Amino acid sequence: MSPMSQDDSFSRSEAPDGAPSGSSRARSASPRRGSGTLAVALLLSLVAIGGAGYVGWRQWQQAQDNAAGNTALQGLQRRVDSLESVAKAGDSERNLLRQRLGDADQVNRSLREELLSQAERTRNLEDAVAKLSEKTLSGHDAMLLDETESLLRMAKERYDLFHDAQGAAAAYALADQALAAVNDGAFSGLRQSIGAEREALAKIQPASLDASLTALSALRTAVLELPLKPLDTAASDASNSHWSRITAAIGNVVKVQRTNGAPLSVADARFARELTAIDLAQAQAALLASDRDAYAAALKRADTGIAAQFDTNAPAVQQARTQLATLQAQQPSAPVQLGAALSELRNLRAVHALKPASASANGAKP
């Protein structure tokens, strides 16, 4: 609605009902028309000022927004520039890493090749060491078996020749130690045979042999001082037998005397002592030779000679006969049969020596 229409309606409403409408409208139209124009002008000026203020505020706000945007844009530009520099540095680092990875791959390939070559060399070295170890073990076992055979042969010969049971037992002990160091299990059963022969040698008492030899030597020395039988005792004993009487009768007819002038009793005593000493020497020889029969026979002859030629009532003669009885009771042990372990060792070595030849022959067959 326009301002003029509003003023007209206001004037018509304020007029009195009795007054005429044309005259009042003419009088009030001019001042009201001026005030309406002024109000419209003021309103328009206020609207223009508000619009100008709003436009200015918008422009200022837009300028502020543009300044903030420029600042943010510059910051973003700087960040973009920094990101570009970082990206370029990352690219260079990636290129460097690629180059390093390439170099590392080459190094790894070379190391792998060297490792494979080292592994091949290690296998070859292990094979060589294994072959050398087999040869060393075989040579070591052969040396120990030679030593064992030599010790067993030496023990047998020593016992057979010198009857040295103690020395033979020591040689068997060394042979057992040498055989224990052999790595081949095929020769382990041989130690039982060596142990059996060693136990048989240990049963022989070497101390009794030395004591017997010492006692025989003492008896040979004591025989030289043993008293002979008295002459009257021999005559009284001879009178008790018929043969003695006949011998006495013949003795009265025929008499025998020494041509060298020595008394008969002295010659008989020397002869009796020498015979007894010879019997004791034969007993010593038989004892050293481990001849049980000869040893017993020699001791029996010596005891018979002492009983026949010497005074059995004398303490020295009785002591000598007691020692002879003791020596007869202490017979030397039966000789030990050695050589079974040595024969078994030689048989095992012969069989063991055929194994490589047979294995190589079987390996050569297709």
Image (tube, grey):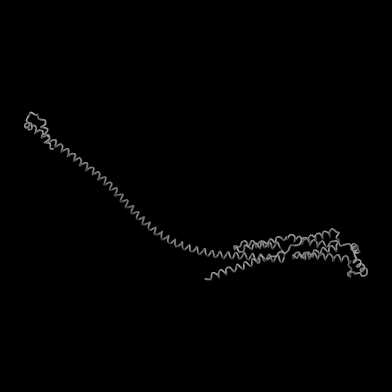
Quarter that holds the N terminus: top left
Where's residue 339, x and y in %?
68, 66
Q: Find residue 49 and report its image quarter.
A: top left
Q: Percent position (x, y) of residue 29?
A: 9, 33
Q: Above or below — where is 276 with respect to 53? A: below
Q: Is residue 42 above or below residue 183?
A: above
Q: Nearer the viewer, residue 143 or 321?
A: 321
Q: With 194 as the anchor, is 295 left or right in this view?
A: right
Q: Position of residue 229 (x, y in %)?
A: 87, 62
The answer to which of 16 and 93 lies nearer the viewer is 16
The residue closer to the viewer here, 184 or 278, is 184
Q: Residue 201 is drawn in which quadrant?
A: bottom right
Q: Position of residue 59 (x, y in %)?
A: 21, 43
Which image quadrant for residue 60? Answer: top left
Front residue of 242/119: it is: 242
Count of marks, rendered view: 0
Instruction: Locate residue 229 relative to residue 24 in the image: left or right.
Output: right
